[in-house]
Amino acid sequence: MSDDVTHYINKTQPWQIDVCEKLRAMVVQTIPDVDERLQYGKPHYLKNGHYAAVIAVAKDKISFMVFNAADVPEVKGFLRSLGKGERKAVDIKDGQTVDYDALAGILKETTAAL
C-alpha cells in the first residue's frame, strides 16, 4: 500500500474514506501484486505496468474507473462509458449502497488479459 495513496484518502470526508478504503481493498484482492501509486493526483492501480483502475474523489462523489473496458457493457444508472468506451466509471455518492462484488467482477474481467 502506498503512503501517498493513504494520505490522499485520509484528506477526504469520513464517508469517502470508508468507500475509498473498501475500493482499495477490493482492488488489492482482485488483482494480486497490483501496483498502487498516486499519479496525476489520484490513486492509480496498475497490473503488469498497464493501467487497471483509478479512484477519484470529488466534493460530493467518488468515481471508480476501470480501463480496458471496451467489451464491458454500459449499465444505465451504474456503469457509464468514458471516451470511446474503453473506460467505464461508477460514481458513488454519500449513503449509496455499493456493490463491491459487481465492481470486483468488472475489474477481474478488464484485467484478465493484462
Image (cartoon, grey):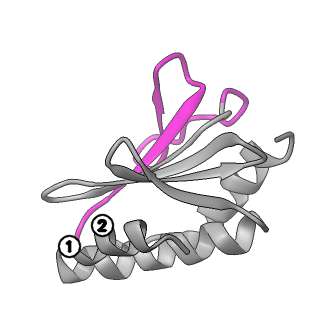
Q: Is residue 55 visible?
A: yes
Whole-percent x, y for residue 25 in the image: 57, 77
Contact check, label 2 and label 1, Cβ < 8 Å: yes
| Helix, strand or loop under label 1 | loop
Which quarter of the image is occupied by the N terminus? bottom right
Q: Which residue has dot 1 on it? A: 11
Q: Is residue 95 visible?
A: no
Label 1 crowd (10 A; few <14 / some 14-19 / many >=20): few
**42 in relation to 68, above or below:** below
**50 in relation to 2, above or below:** above
State the predominant SS element of the stretch in magenta: loop
Residue 92 is covered by the magenta coloring = yes
Whole-percent x, y for residue 27 in the image: 62, 66
Classify residue 91 as left or right of residue 72.
left
| Helix, strand or loop under label 2 | helix
User: Which residue of the protein is positioned furthest toward the left in this rendering?
Assistant: 59
Classify residue 91 as left or right of residue 98.
left
Give the spatial CA distance, label 2 vs label 1.
Answer: 6 Å
Tell me which corner region of the image, top left, top right, bottom left or bottom right, holds residue 102. Answer: bottom right
Q: Which residue has dot 2 on it? A: 8
**55 in relation to 22, above or below:** above
In the rendered structure, which amino acid carries the disc numbered 1? Answer: Lys
In the rendered structure, which amino acid carries the disc numbered 2? Answer: Tyr
* Residue drawn where x is 79% and y is 68% of the image: 32
Which quarter of the image is occupied by the C terminus? top right
Residue 59 circle label: none
- Magenta segment boundaries in residue numbering: 70-95
Residue 110 is covered by the magenta coloring = no
* Residue drawn where x is 78% and y is 47% of the image: 48
Q: Nearer the viewer, residue 77 or 19?
A: 19
